[in-house]
Image (tube, rainbow, N blue to C red):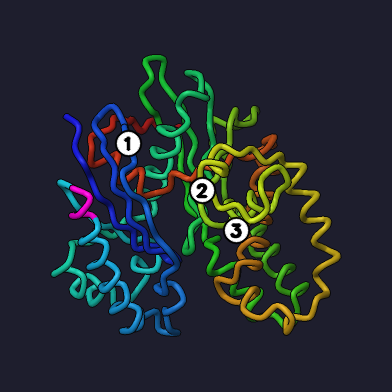
């Protein structure tokens, strides 16, 4: 039976709300979607604690989202958190503060990979043929999840492998924030991406043949897509961005062209190259996609605007999937 669900996301960078009608057959209608940047990832101190201010802000936002979800007729409201809360030493304080508003499920890395994959394949099932392997790259603020799989002959979503890398945009942008120059930050970010990817063992299902499709989720891929020619300057339309294909060669060319800009004094760029800065997020994301696509010899990446919260909502609605690793 179809039901109206609401899902609140407490991400490392973003705080978001999704309200949609769904059933085991999938999402039939997105009723309401909103969100913006949050402070959870930035607020972690040297001891790994979330600040009281960030917790209070998250609670206030949750209260507003619960009201909005109720106004939109949501029959079930749930919430989840990702890496910033998962890694926080005072996680219990965060959960206790949110409990009067909404119970929050802290996803582990495996769940993030699985649910991001579920959201992506459900969104693009019409482009995948049974037996074709897809690779999903979900780069959030706290971590980067990789997952591969596809569809069985009868159309059931099947996950073949997953991995989680410490390549969240907050850590990548920190390389720029702590460096003396933009060029040094870029080099440090590149070294971090390469070092982390060296520990990733390619999925057995993709050894010997590149993925038929690669999909990217997260703010960095969105920012990258907005910078490419072919759309209206400054256009923010999710409909325009969703499904946009970016060739691997194009990302490589953008990285080469970026070299001319790396000697720009950091002082002229301000917070754009700080932690969570839009420019440092873009550059760190470009490097991540470039090296991952190169590792898997993929021809490019397709933008997916249906993020992790869509997967959480689908799972709650009973959307069927299987995990068959190997």
View extreme (right): residue:
260
Marks 2 and 1, the one that precedes in the sequence: 1
Reply above or below: 311 against 268: above
Question: Distance between the Cα atoms at labels 3 and 2?
Answer: 19 Å
Q: Residue at x 42, y 74 (%)?
A: 39
Q: Residue at x 70, y 77 (%)?
A: 269
Residue 29's label in the rendered image is 1
Q: Residues within 10 Å of mark 2 (few under 14, many from 20)?
A: many
Residue 217's label in the rendered image is 2
210 lies left or right of 98: right
Name the dominant secondary structure of the magenta segment: helix
Q: Choose between 96 and 27: the one closer to the eye.
A: 27
Marks 3 and 2, the one that precedes in the sequence: 3
55 lies left or right of 273: left
Callout in the foreground (1, 3): 1
Callout in the foreground (2, 1): 1
């Amino acid at each position: 039976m179809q039901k109206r669900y609401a899902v609140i996301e407490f991400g490392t960078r973003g705080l978001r709300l999704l309200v949609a009608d769904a059933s085991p057959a999938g999402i039939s209608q997105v009723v309401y979607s909103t969100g913006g940047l949050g402070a959870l990832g930035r607020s972690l101190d040297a001891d790994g604690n979330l600040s009281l201010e960030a917790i209070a802000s998250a609670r206030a936002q949750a209260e507003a989202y619960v009201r909005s979800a109720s106004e939109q007729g949501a029959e079930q409201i749930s919430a989840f958190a990702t890496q910033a809360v998962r890694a926080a030493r005072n996680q219990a304080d965060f959960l206790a503060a949110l409990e009067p508003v909404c119970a929050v499920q802290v996803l582990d890395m495996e769940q993030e990979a699985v649910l991001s994959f579920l959201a992506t394949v459900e969104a693009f099932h019409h482009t995948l043929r049974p037996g074709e392997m897809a690779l999903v790259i979900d780069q959030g603020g706290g971590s980067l999840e990789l997952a591969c799989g596809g569809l069985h002959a009868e159309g059931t979503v099947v996950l073949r492998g997953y991995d989680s890398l410490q390549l969240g945009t907050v850590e990548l942008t920190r390389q720029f924030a702590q460096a003396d120059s933009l060029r040094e930050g870029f080099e440090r970010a590149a070294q971090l991406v390469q070092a982390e990817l060296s520990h990733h063992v390619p999925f057995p299902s993709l050894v010997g043949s590149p993925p038929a499709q690669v999909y990217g989720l997260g703010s960095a891929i969105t920012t990258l897509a907005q910078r490419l020619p072919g759309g209206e300057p400054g256009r923010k339309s999710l409909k325009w961005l969703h499904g946009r294909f970016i060739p691997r060669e194009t990302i490589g060319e953008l990285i080469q062209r970026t070299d001319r800009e790396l000697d720009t004094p950091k002082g002229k760029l301000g917070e754009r190259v700080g932690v969570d800065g839009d420019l440092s997020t873009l550059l760190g994301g470009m490097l991540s996609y470039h090296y991952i696509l190169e590792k898997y010899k993929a021809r490019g990446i397709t933008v997916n605007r249906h993020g992790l919260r869509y997967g959480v909502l689908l799972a709650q609605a009973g959307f069927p999937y299987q995990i068959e690793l190997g």
